[in-house]
Image (tube, grey):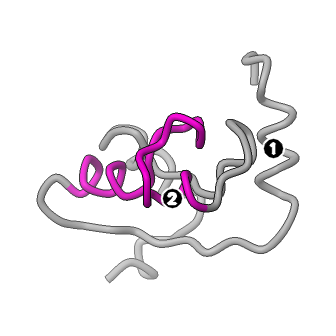
Amino acid sequence: KERPFYGELVQMMSSGPIVTMVIEGENAVSKLREVVGATDPKKAAVGTIREVFGSNITDNAIHASDSLASATREIPFFFTEQEIF
């Protein structure tokens, strides 16, 4: 909450419907981050989700956990244990 971009981030993330998922597998975080692309769509590799659909650093089209620790903290925000199979 103390970060300067927090307000804009909350506004963007609550601006419309979302699709949530949990991806599991060997090196899942790093593999997904490759598909997602850099946070700044202007710096994202060609063909990544953010390069194709992102507008700017705040409206970058997708969120993906940056580490297993982040995923462990973020997943329960959206899912109960019974919803993950």
Please give the label number shown on residue 52. none
The amino acid marked with disc number 2 is Pro
Magenta span contains residue 36: yes
* Number of callouts: 2
**Residue 24 placed where, x, y %?**
25, 67
Residue at x 59%, y 57% (from the top left corner): 62
Classify mark 1: residues with Cα within 10 Å, few (<14), some (14-19) or many (20+).
few
Q: Viewer-proximal residue, 17 or 51?
A: 51
Q: Residue at x 73, y 49 (%)?
A: 55
**Which residue is denoted by mark 1 in the rendering?**
10
Instruction: Check the picture and name the quadrant holding the N terminus.
Output: top right
Q: Secondary structure at mark 1?
A: helix
x%, y% of residue 56? 72, 40
Q: Is residue 66 magenta?
A: no
Give the SS element for disc 2.
Answer: helix
Taking 63 as reference, is 75 left or right? left
Picture quarter containing residue 40? top right
Q: Is residue 27 left or right of residue 17?
A: left
Tell me where the magenta segment starts and ends, as one range: 28-52
Q: Name the foreground residue: 84 vs 15.
A: 15
Question: Residue 30: x percent and y percent?
Answer: 26, 47
Q: Kindly report the distance in space between the C-alpha atoms of the residues bearing marks 1 and 2.
A: 18 Å
Please name the amino acid that badge 1 sits on.
Val
Q: Which of the 4 quarters of the picture holds residue 7?
A: top right
Look at 41% across and 46% down and name the residue there. Answer: 45
Residue 41 vertical placement versus 52 (above, below): above
Note whether 30 is above or below 42 in the view shown: below
Q: Earlier in the sequence, mark 1 or mark 2?
A: 1
Task: Name the residue that disc number 2 marks.
Answer: 76
Front residue (pair 22, 83) = 22
- Pinpoint residue 48: horizontal percent, then vertical percent: 44, 57
Q: Residues within 10 Å of mark 2 (few under 14, many from 20)?
A: few
